[in-house]
Image: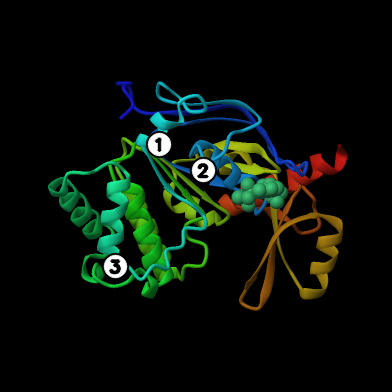
Amino acid sequence: MPSATSSPTLTLRDVRHGYPNGTRALDGVSLTIPCGMFGLLGPNGAGKSTLMRTIATLQTPSSGEVRFCDIDVLREPERLRRTLGYLPQDFGVYARVSAYDMLDHMAVLKGITAPADRKVTVETLLQQVNLWDVRKKALAGFSGGMRQRFGIAQALIGNPSLIIVDEPTAGLDPEERNRFLNLLAEIGEQVVVILSTHIVADVADLCPRMAVMVGGRVQREGAPLELVQGTRGRIWQKTVSRAELADVREEHVLLSSRLSAGRTVVHILADHDPGNGFVSADADLEDVYFATLADARRVHAGR
Ligand code: ADP
């Protein structure tokens, strides 16, 4: 455990990373991440996994600073690893080994060598993630949701105070996703949990704080409600016909179009009243996300 007595905080300062092929995956990321669930939202290619792997000490950034409590993460990766739980994006366990035996093995690797301690750890975790009944089954036969729940169990070995889950709900059906998110919500409040995702609802449902990342940069950061309020006056709504939709797309920055009783309801981004039948919309987090992507694209195009 980190020795700081105050509640754990992760701080990133101007973190940059360029891959050898020239891709600038992180372009000056600065973030302060307090205790609780933090949502890192962004489209594919935004740099989320690069950032998660950097925090998890699996890769070293080109420059910048990462601190967790009193740990200088880039200089003392071993200390960070002792207090880290990580569920990577590509966590695949196709082993013929049972869930119990695999978790037991992973607990040994995490340093829980005393058999009695390990038994308590493994049994508690299997119950916590609701895999107790299938503990003797081979992981190879697990569904996607069961596999992700096993992934959380292994991430929780040793009571980490920093937990990183990278795109954990991709590919899960709605019921499995719900179950998984409920499990995340139960993780203690005295722990920093970073949930990286491209699914807006994951963040909206779970995270008191969040950031939106696009093109290697943090474009927005704050409480979801605060961010929603920040778009006030910029999101406009209209019900249109299919034919009108093409015009809207042409003339405005279209954020979303949803079918409602056979008609199409569009949301657009505009700094001033666009007139022409548009009314101010009750924005939600999805509007914030798409508006952020649109703003980032505009800035990029104007560069
Ligand atoms: P995300 O997790 O948000 O999808 P990534 O961190 O995986 O984003 O990728 C960010 C950018 O870096 C993308 O343009 C991706 O193609 C590139 N990238 C990721 N990994 C590598 C790598 N090993 N070598 C070169 N480019 C990479």
Residue 242 location (% of width, % of height): 77, 74
* Badge 3 amino acid: Ser
Nearer-N-terminus badge (2/1): 1
Query: Residue at left 52%, top 62%?
Result: 170
Relative to 150, residue 38 above or below: above
Please name the residue that numbered disc 3 is placed on.
98
Query: In front: mark 2 or mark 3?
Result: 3
* Badge 2 amino acid: Pro
Indicate left or right for 293 with 7 as reference. right
What's the mark number on residue 149? none
Nearer-N-terminus badge (2/3): 3
| Callout 2: CB less than 8 Å from ligand 1 | no
Residue 286 vs residue 217, the one in the foreground = 217
Residue 57 location (% of width, % of height): 50, 37
What's the mark number on residue 81? 1
Query: In front: mark 2 or mark 1?
Result: 1
What whole-number distance in Å separates the C-alpha atoms at marks 2 and 3? 40 Å
The local secondary structure at tag 1 comes to helix
Query: Residue at left 51%, top 58%?
Result: 90
Please name the residue that numbered disc 2 is placed on.
224
Nearer-N-terminus badge (3/1): 1
What whole-number distance in Å separates the C-alpha atoms at marks 2 and 1? 30 Å
- Mark 2 in CB contact with mark 1 (< 8 angstroms): no
What whole-number distance in Å separates the C-alpha atoms at marks 3 and 1? 25 Å
The local secondary structure at tag 3 comes to loop
Quarter of the image that includes the N terminus:
top left
Query: Residue at left 53%, top 38%?
Result: 226
Q: Quadrant of residue 64?
A: top right
* Badge 1 amino acid: Arg
Q: Does the rendering let one see residue 232?
A: no
Indicate left or right for 22 with 124 as reference. right
